[in-house]
Image (tube, helix red, strand yellow):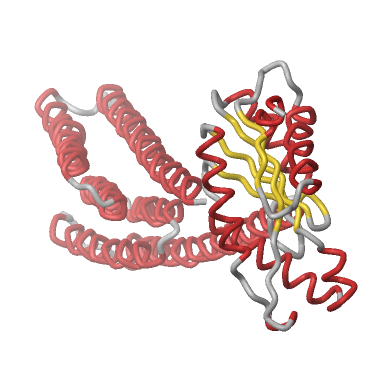
Amino acid sequence: MKYEVNNEIMHTVRLKVTIRKTIWFAIFICLITELAFFFSYRFIEQSLVDEQMFEHIIQYIAKPTSINLLIAAIYHVFGAILKKESVKSFTMVAAISAICFNLTITHYTLPSLMTIFCLPIFITSMFERKKLTKIVLLLTFIFYALTIYFANYKSAIPLTFDGYYIDAFIAFAVILSSYIFTNVLINYHMEYVFITKSNSLRQTEIIEQVKRDPLTNLYNKKIFYDSLSVAMKQCNKLCVAVLDIDNFKTVNDTYGHSVGDIVLVALADMLTNISSKKILTARYGGEEFSIIFKDMTTFESYDIVETLRLEFSELTFPQMDNKSVTFSCGLSGDSPSTLSSIDFFNEADQALYYAKSNGKNQTVIFTSLDDE
């Protein structure tokens, strides 16, 4: 689960980096387009004399483009220094807002151009942070007010309500609408992500439930065989143990099946405690359990099973007048690659049969049967 979470975090970081690069590429294309448009327009305009041509190139092409390139360069320097993703995202949106502001004061006679401030507001929807959207909106209103102030300060003729302020007001309404719409997008996407994650989590839980025995919460017989088949291909050393509770029918007949379930759960809890990446535990069926020991020798596996057997035999059950219960175990080890998973399990099962037939409450290794 931790590995999956780390993968999700890394994917999110990579996605944000990709988004920022894509946005900056789009901004770069817009700047090039703007440069080409004004460059062509000023040269096509025949009414301008040479002196005016040069002045317009400096004012409308060279100066704003240089400022925009400087803003972009400053952002990329900060982007390389900053480590926190949220700060990088804010810096990028702030830089784009500054570029938009540069364009509006360059062409201050076009109040409708102020609708370009919608761009950085819309971009914040990609980062799903309402706080970032609010900050950018505040920054946008500051730039909006400065643009109007600059237009009044620079304009050679007085600005009229019909000729300028009505368009500026419409631009303001569009900016405000973009903020509202962006919040709607963020809310919708957050709700969608929440529902998707909830469904995914629920699906994972259902799949995990199908893999496990409902009483003991250990893996079931199918998962045991699936895991054993994979382990036989991947592990150089492999052991399988089969455990069977001794005289379990007597427990059920004497004290009832509910007490029998308590005994099963007690052994299952002990098996759960020894489970790890190298040890997979499962309920094979009834009072029988199975264990896969990955990359462990027969004797290492034997020591673990024996420790488990002794600890279990020392347990007492109040529901059984404080009596104890034991189990027998068969162990097969160092799996030959020529065996199937079923044949390999059957070796452990044969060792278990020998243990049950010769006194119970013991662990028998399959290889030791060859000597008898």
Residue located 72% across and 69% down the image: 263
State the image coordinates of residue 247 (x, y, percent, origin top left): 81, 62
Q: Which residue is at the far top?
A: 338
Reply above or below: 214 against 275: below
44 relative position to 64: left or right: right
The picture quadrant where one finds residue 223 is top right
Q: Quadrant of residue 271?
A: bottom right
Return the residue nearer the eye: 130 or 112.
Answer: 130
Snapshot quadrant of residue 57? top left
Q: Give left or right: position of 5 versus 333.
A: left
**Would residue 298 be found to the left or right of residue 64 on screen?**
right
> Residue 34: x and y, percent?
32, 33
Residue 104 visible to the viewer:
no
Q: Which residue is rendered at x = 36% and y = 67% of the image?
A: 131
Where does residue 80 sit, x and y in percent of width and height? 19, 39
In this view, the residue in front, 39 or 346, is 346
Q: Is residue 99 above or below residue 161?
A: above
Q: Is residue 367 visible?
A: yes
Q: Residue at x 54, y 65 (%)?
A: 187
The C terminus, quarter of image: top right
x, y percentage for residue 189?
Answer: 56, 58
- In the orientation shown, which residue stands out farthest toward the right? 253
Q: Is residue 310 positioned above or below 54 on the image? A: below
Q: Looking at this view, name the residue that lies furthest to the front.
A: 372
Q: How many numbered marks have been drawn onto this rendered protein structure? A: 0
Asked whether 140 or 34 is in front, the reply is: 140
